[in-house]
């Protein structure tokens, strides 16, 4: 009888330590933008960085977004598939040659409805600074 209680106490203590250990594990950091999207950028090399866009804002009432627009500082815009309801993220890459200090770009989330009537968030600006 004593052994069973001791084993039960050890099991509870182990579970509690496991939960506590899980709470201190490092997590990826993403910045949340004003339009509900998240961005996390990391260098792939000394000359290139990749940014991962996530989140799942709603537009036009309660539509989940299914595309993101990424606009660079020159005004060029790319559209990427972004089925956020499925947990999909979008990736955008930037070269250091564009700006040695950092790169600023705009991100907008949209729901493709019909041509000319997409429902979109406003653009939010994000700046990634290259590591020293």
Image: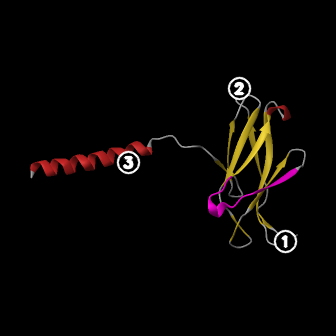
Disc 2 or 1, which lies upstream in sequence?
A: 1
Height in image: 53 above or below 116?
above
**Marking on residue 92:** none
Disc 1 or 3, which lies upstream in sequence?
A: 3
- What residue span does the magenta drawing correspond to? 77-89
Q: Where is residue 110 in the image (x, y as percent from the top left)?
A: 77, 63
Could you tell me which secondary element the residue under label 3 belongs to? helix
Residue marked by disc 3: 19
Q: Which residue is drawn at 69% across and 61% down?
A: 83
In-image side of 44 versus 114 (left or right) = left
The answer to whether residue 78 is magenta is yes
Residue marked by disc 1: 117
Height in image: 113 above or below 124?
below
Q: Residue at x 85, y 35 (%)?
A: 98
Mark 1, Cα crowd under 10 Å, few <14 / some 14-19 / many 20+, is few
The answer to whether residue 10 is magenta is no
- Front residue of 125/11: it is 11
CA gap between label 2 and label 1 equals 43 Å
Residue marked by disc 2: 132
Do labels 1 and 3 touch, CB within 8 Å? no
Q: Residue at x 73, y 28 (%)?
A: 46
The outermost residue toward the left is: 1
Q: Nearer the viewer, mark 2 or mark 1?
A: 1
């Amino acid at each position: 009888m004593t052994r069973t209680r001791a084993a039960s106490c050890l099991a509870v203590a182990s579970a509690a330590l496991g939960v506590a250990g899980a709470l201190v594990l490092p997590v990826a950091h993403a910045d949340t933008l004003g339009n509900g999207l998240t961005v996390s950028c990391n260098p792939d090399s000394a000359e290139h960085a990749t940014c991962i866009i996530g989140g799942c804002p709603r537009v036009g009432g309660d539509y989940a977004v299914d595309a993101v627009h990424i606009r660079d500082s020159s005004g060029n815009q790319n559209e990427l598939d972004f089925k956020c309801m499925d947990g999909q993220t979008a990736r955008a890459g930037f070269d250091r040659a564009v700006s040695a200090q950092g790169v600023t770009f705009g991100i907008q989330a949209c729901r493709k409805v019909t041509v000319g009537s997409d429902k979109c968030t406003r653009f939010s600006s994000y700046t990634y600074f290259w590591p020293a």
